[in-house]
């Protein structure tokens, strides 16, 4: 009985496992088990039948396991192990064509040799510039330029067929990976900075054209002309060329045949200098010591100083100084205020000349006109001070003899009317009565009070001799008033 129960349990488990894979076989085996159980035959016959059924069930289990394994391996969504040869082989999308192209171009490449297959061929390098900012230092005669250089040339060793590299038509190279021309600034003013272009990458096209756009800061010497300072215009140049190669090895040209210097959209204007024009030219230089020619590309900048502040701070004070000096000659001959005005004007000229000494460089070939203007104005003011002292002395100092007759007649005649000396004008007669009558006429004039005070101050009231000297002193000052007016007009027309 115990044996029959165990066999029954074994047959039931086998039936559950094998029911999904071989229904036919399991049904047959189950029917046989049922028949054996219901027939209640002898124990030996049952054992033989059960053993045969068990063997048959085991065979069907092994067969079904193999079928399941085969199904699992061939299922598309399965995550079981696959053929190692398939997983290790890279697909075409996983190939880095840019890296493959770099290896193809750089493996036989030599960056220290000119990129031409025939050593007799010339490498043409085109130069251009885009401007960001510039400044001019007059004291050091140095032009500072910030911009982008633009260079391109053809490298015969950097050509490829884009179809062989998945239509890859351009590639980047580092600053030390390929050949680059030794283009230097000839009139460089910064000896410590010969590497103007820094470490910037190259862009290479499949045709072999190399484009290089490095940012750079240049400091070049510029010949300064301060003759018209502070309203002058300056012309400064940047001259570029190969440092070691002549024209048969490296030829220079203009970038895309552009003869002008482009201003970038973030160009920063200088507060003092306006760029009137900028252009690029190609030149060929021939030296007597060598047979080869050396080409260069020169960028020229025409700068105009924007000088509203200079006009207000330098030119306007000089004009006011001239007016003060000229107007001092219109004061009465004995007025001491004219000395005060002229002395202040003289100090103003001296202070401005000291300022020019510190603000402007010392030029050996020319002197700025504004400096000459102030120096000449200072000289004229100094002469005016001497004339004022002489005229005050003539009008105030006690004298017992009259002026020379020709001088008295000169200022009392036609010249006196031109110089507007009607207040001092009188004809000197041989009789004292005539003098008294003419002095009475002067007494009725608007300036008679000042003249009487001048005469009374020296104890010469009513004296004809002193009146004659006052007339001469006034005539001298009015005469120099005309001279100074003409002189200042000429100086202003020349310097301004």
Image: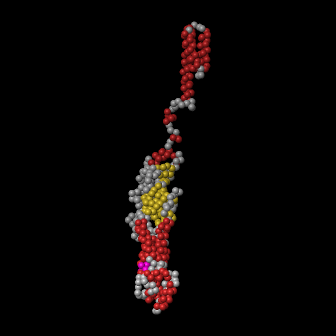
109 versus 51 height, above or below = below
Name of the residue lying farthest toward the bottom:
430
Would you place residue 399 above or below residue 210 in this image?
A: below
What residue is drawn where x is 46% and y is 81%?
453
**Foreground pick, 244 / 488:** 488
Q: Which residues are magenta?
A: 388-392
Q: Position of residue 203 (x, y in %)?
A: 49, 51
Count of numbered circles in the view = 0
Where does the image place residue 137, in percent across and percent down from the top left? 44, 63
Looking at the rendered image, the quarter that the N terminus falls into is: top right
| Horizontal side of residue 278 vs 26, given as left or right | left
The reply to whether residue 486 is visible in this rendering is: no
Residue drawn 48% across and 56% down?
148
Task: Point out the residue furthest to the left here.
Answer: 289
Horizontal and vertical percent position of residue 248: 43, 60
Q: Is residue 44 visible?
A: yes
């Amino acid at each position: 009985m115990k044996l029959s129960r165990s066999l029954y349990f074994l047959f039931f488990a086998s039936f559950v496992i094998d029911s999904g894979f071989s229904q036919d076989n399991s049904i047959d085996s189950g029917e046989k088990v049922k028949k054996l159980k219901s027939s209640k035959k002898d124990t030996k016959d049952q054992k033989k039948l059960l053993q045969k059924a068990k063997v048959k069930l085991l065979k069907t289990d092994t067969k079904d396991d193999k079928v399941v394994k085969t199904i699992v391996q061939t299922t598309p969504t399965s995550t079981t192990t696959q053929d190692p040869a398939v997983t290790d082989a890279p697909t075409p999308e996983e190939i880095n064509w840019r890296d493959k192209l770099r290896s193809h171009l750089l493996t036989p490449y030599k960056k220290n040799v000119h990129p031409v297959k025939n050593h007799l061929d010339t490498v043409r390098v085109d130069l251009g510039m885009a401007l960001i900012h510039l400044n001019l230092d007059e004291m050091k005669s140095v032009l500072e330029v910030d911009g982008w250089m633009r260079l391109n040339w053809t490298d015969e060793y950097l050509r490829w067929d884009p179809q062989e590299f998945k239509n890859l038509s351009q590639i980047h190279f580092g600053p030390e990976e390929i050949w680059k021309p030794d283009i230097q600034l000839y009139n460089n003013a910064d000896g410590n900075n010969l590497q103007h272009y820094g470490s910037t990458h190259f862009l290479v096209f499949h045709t072999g054209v190399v484009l290089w756009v490095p940012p750079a800061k240049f400091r070049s010497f510029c010949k300064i002309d301060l003759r018209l300072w502070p309203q002058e215009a300056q012309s400064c140049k940047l001259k570029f060329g190969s440092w070691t190669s002549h024209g048969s090895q490296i030829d220079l040209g203009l970038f895309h045949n552009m003869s002008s210097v482009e201003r970038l959209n973030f160009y920063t204007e200088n507060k003092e200098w306006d760029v009137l024009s900028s252009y690029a030219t190609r030149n060929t230089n021939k030296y007597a010591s060598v047979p080869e020619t050396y080409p260069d590309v020169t960028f020229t900048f025409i700068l105009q100083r924007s000088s509203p502040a200079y006009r207000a701070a330098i030119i306007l004070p000089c004009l006011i100084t001239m007016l003060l000096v000229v107007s001092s000659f219109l004061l009465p001959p004995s007025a001491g205020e004219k000395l005060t005005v002229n002395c202040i004007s003289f100090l103003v000229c001296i202070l401005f000349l000291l300022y020019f000494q510190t603000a402007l460089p010392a030029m050996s070939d020319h002197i700025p006109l504004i400096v000459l203007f102030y120096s000449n104005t200072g000289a004229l003011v100094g002469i005016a001070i001497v004339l004022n002292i002489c005229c005050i002395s003539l009008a105030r100092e006690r004298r017992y003899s009259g002026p020379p007759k020709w001088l008295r007649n000169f200022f009392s005649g036609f010249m006196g009317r031109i110089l507007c000396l009607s207040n001092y004008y009188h004809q000197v007669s041989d009789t004292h009565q005539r003098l008294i009558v003419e002095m009475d006429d002067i007494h009725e004039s608007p300036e008679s009070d000042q003249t009487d005070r001048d005469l009374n101050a020296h104890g010469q009231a009513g004296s004809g001799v002193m009146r004659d000297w006052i007339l001469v002193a006034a005539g001298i000052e009015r005469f120099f008033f005309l001279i100074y007016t003409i002189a200042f007009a000429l100086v202003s027309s020349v310097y301004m």
